[in-house]
Amino acid sequence: TGPTIRMLAALEPRRLAVMHGSSFEGDCAALLSQLADFYEAALAAKSGHPRSP
């Protein structure tokens, strides 16, 4: 999950939008990186394995 989101962040999008929802325009790469961090931490906590740096 994290690596896939980071690949999207590497594309440096300027706008993020979801189908039938709101959109965001700005530093999308930074937000996607934060989202990847969140998912990695959540998955690590659920699996009982510490997150690697």
Image: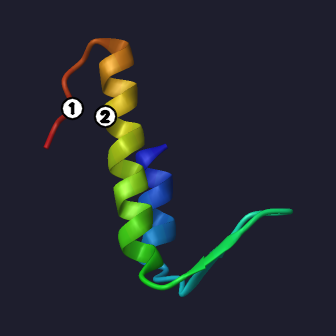
On the rendered structure, is 7 left or right of 18? left
Q: Is residue 16 above or below residue 53?
A: below
31 vs 38: above or below:
below
Distance from label 1 to label 2 (Cα)? Answer: 6 Å
The mark nearer the N terminus, 1 or 2, is: 2
Q: Point out residue 45 in the picture as x, y percentages from the top left corner.
A: 31, 20
The amino acid type found where label 2 is placed reads: Ala
Residue drawn 37% across and 43% down? 38
Q: Quadrant of the C terminus?
A: top left
Q: Residue beneath label 2, please?
A: 41
Instruction: Assess disc 1: are there few (<14), some (14-19) or many (≥20) residues with their C-alpha within 10 Å of its C-alpha.
Output: few
Q: Which mark is residue 51?
A: 1
Rendered position, 50 above or below 11? above
Disc 2 crowd rating (10 Å Cα; few below 14, some 14-19, many 20+) is some
Residue with the most extreme right position: 20
Is disc 1 placed on a helix, strand or loop? Answer: loop
Q: Position of residue 30 (x, y in %)?
A: 35, 71
Helix, strand or loop under label 2:
helix
Which residue is drawn at the image coordinates 48% and 85% (left, top)?
26
Count of numbered circles on the image: 2
Nearer to us of marks 1 and 2 is: 2
User: Please, what is the three-letter code of the amino acid marked with disc 1?
Assistant: Arg
Residues tagged 1 and 2 counted as in contact (Cβ below 8 A)? yes
In the image, residue 23 lies at what x, y percent?
67, 74
- Which residue is painted at 17% across and 36% down in the image? 52
List the single residue furthest toward the top. Answer: 48
